[in-house]
Image: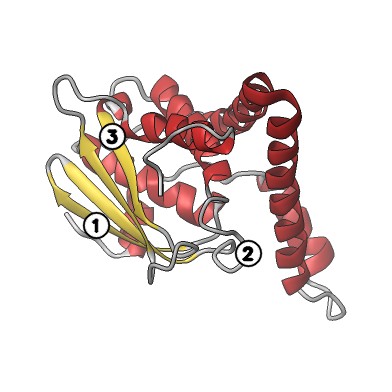
Amino acid sequence: MNLNQEERRAKIKLNKPFAKPVEKLRSDALSRDDYDPAQLFSWGQMMAVSVLEMLKAVEARFGREGQEVCTEALAGVGERLAQEALAGVEMPEGMSDVEAISLFATWINEQLYASVEKPSIDSADAASFDILWCPHQDVYGPFDCRVQRYLVEGMMRGASEKLTGVGFETFNVRCDSTMPAGAPMCHFSIWRTREGENNAWTAYSRQLEDKALGGPTTAP
């Protein structure tokens, strides 16, 4: 079932992140003639790069233990945002689990990552999406995108806790290509986990953690 974005958004109403501060932003800043909204982009990049550099510095000084403290803190933020998004939300009758996880991915991409997304339901067991534009694409290097993985890990954890009957925990997610690495778009695959299959997202995150600490990895 491949719907356009407006039809997809109408299927399920997730709560907006930071709803009250966003409304205050609209009334106190965006309504002003002397305020340039592009300043928000610069501010956001400063914060994103700061988090990345903090992670690198803690890894360099404290090794694996410091890395785990940072990555779990990021995952905790993602989990909280997912729980807030899904508070009081029920899946519409007749919605399949693959459609539900695809719609949740759209919420992540549009609401939290402020990205332009092209989603697709590929089968009863698989979905995918392309990120056509991402705020970080011209700021991050290829290895820097790893910092976002922990936020997503937390979001998936929070979604599984809030929607236990949907089966979010039974799906696998993989990043196939990224714009910072030279691809024309970022491509992600989602599929129903096969018997005996490991969690691809967390397994690759662990490889990247090893690489950051100077260990062997198959990560590009």
Q: In this view of the protein, which residue sits in the foreground, 64 or 90? A: 64
Residue 93 on image: x %, y %: 23, 35
Does 210 appear above or below 106? Answer: above
* Label 1 CA crowd tier, 10 Å (few <14, some 14–19, many 20+): some
- Is 80 left, or right, of 191 in this rendering? right
Element on which disc 1 rests: strand
Q: CA distance from mark 2 to mark 3?
A: 28 Å
Does 126 appear above or below 84? Answer: below
Q: Residue at x 60, y 24 (%)?
A: 72
* Label 2 CA crowd tier, 10 Å (few <14, some 14–19, many 20+): some
Q: In this view of the protein, which residue sits in the foreground, 50 or 94? A: 50
Q: Residue at x 24, y 57 (%)?
A: 120
Q: CA distance from mark 1 to mark 2?
A: 27 Å
Of the two numbered discs 3 and 1 on the same chain, state the one appearing first in sequence: 1
Q: CA distance from mark 3 to mark 1?
A: 16 Å
Q: Which mark is residue 120?
A: 1
Q: Amino acid at mark 2?
A: Val
Does 136 appear above or below 111? Answer: below
Q: Amino acid at mark 3?
A: Asn
Residue 112 on image: x %, y %: 56, 50
* Circle 3 or circle 1, nearest the eye: 3
The quadrant where residue 36 appears: bottom right
Element on which disc 3 rests: strand
Q: Amino acid at mark 1?
A: Ser
Q: Which quadrant of the figure contains the N terminus?
A: bottom left
Q: Which residue is mark 2?
A: 139
- Is 216 left, or right, of 11 in this rendering? right
Element on which disc 2 rests: loop
Q: Which residue is mark 3?
A: 172
Residue 148 on image: x %, y %: 55, 44
